[in-house]
C-alpha cells in the first residue's frame, strides 16, 4: 500500500510561526485507491452522510466493501482522524473489512444475501450498487 502521507499530502499545514498542524480530511476516494486494487464500481450516497459501496478487482479475486460515513468529526471516522497514524489505522480497518472471493463466489454471496436485513437497503444507491455489481461479476465470471 502507498504511504499514507502520499495519500493525503495536504493534511499537514504550517502556521505563520512554522508550526505544523494536522488538517482533517474527508475524501475517502484517495484512501480506497491507496489499497492498490482496481475499483470496478463505486456508488456513494449523495448527501452529507451515508454509505460507500465498492467492488474491487485484484488479479483473479474480487472484493466487496460497504461502509458508512458522516458529515462531521463526531460521526465520520476519517474526519475524526487527527494524525497520519489514525488515518492509517482506519485504512487498515477498512482493508480488513473487504470480503474477497472469485467472481463466482462473490456473485453467489451477493445474490444469496438477504439485503433487506441491511440498514442501507432503503437507499436507492444500495439497490443500484447490487444490480450493477451482479452485472459486472456475471460478465467477469464469463471471461
Image (tube, grey):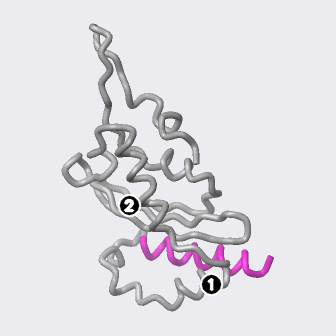
Residue 6 located left or right of residue 24: right
Q: Which numbered disc, 2 or 1, marks the residue closer to the eye?
A: 1
Q: Secondary structure at mark 1?
A: helix
Q: Quadrant of residue 17?
A: top left
The x and y percentages for residue 91 are 44, 53
Magenta segment main secondary structure = helix
Identify residue for label 2.
45
Q: Is residue 48 magenta?
A: no
Decide: few, some or many residues near mark 1? Use Cα within 10 Å; few <14, some 14-19, many ≥20. Answer: some
Q: Which residues are magenta?
A: 126-143
Identify residue for label 1.
105
Q: Is residue 137 magenta?
A: yes
The residue most toward the right is 143
Q: Label 2 vs label 1: CA separation?
A: 26 Å
Q: Give the residue drawn at x 51%, y 91%.
A: 112
The x and y percentages for residue 98 are 50, 68
Q: Quadrant of residue 23?
A: top left
The x and y percentages for residue 42 are 52, 61
Decide: few, some or many residues near mark 2? Use Cα within 10 Å; few <14, some 14-19, many ≥20. Answer: some
The x and y percentages for residue 29 are 49, 48
The residue most toward the left is 74
**Nearer the observer, 131 or 94:** 94
Q: Give the residue drawn at x 39%, y 38%.
A: 84
Residue 136 located left or right of residue 94: right
Looking at the image, is 65 positioned above or below residue 135?
above
Of the numbered discs 2 and 1, the one sitting upstream in the chain is 2
Amino acid at each position: 500500500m502507498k504511504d499514507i502521507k502520499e495519500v493525503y499530502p495536504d493534511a499537514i499545514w504550517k502556521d505563520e510561526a512554522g508550526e505544523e498542524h494536522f488538517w482533517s480530511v474527508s475524501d475517502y476516494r484517495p484512501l480506497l485507491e491507496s489499497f492498490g486494487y482496481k475499483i470496478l464500481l463505486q456508488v456513494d450516497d449523495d448527501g452529507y452522510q451515508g454509505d460507500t459501496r465498492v467492488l474491487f478487482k485484484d488479479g483473479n479475486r474480487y472484493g466487496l466493501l460497504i461502509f458508512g460515513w458522516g458529515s462531521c468529526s463526531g460521526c465520520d471516522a476519517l474526519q475524526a482522524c487527527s494524525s497520519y497514524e489514525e488515518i492509517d489505522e482506519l485504512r487498515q480497518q477498512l482493508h480488513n473489512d473487504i470480503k474477497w472471493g472469485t467472481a463466482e463466489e462473490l456473485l453467489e454471496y451477493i445474490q444469496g444475501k438477504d439485503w433487506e436485513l441491511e440498514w442501507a437497503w432503503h437507499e436507492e444507491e444500495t439497490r443500484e450498487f447490487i444490480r450493477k455489481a451482479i452485472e459486472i461479476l456475471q460478465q467477469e465470471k464469463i471471461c
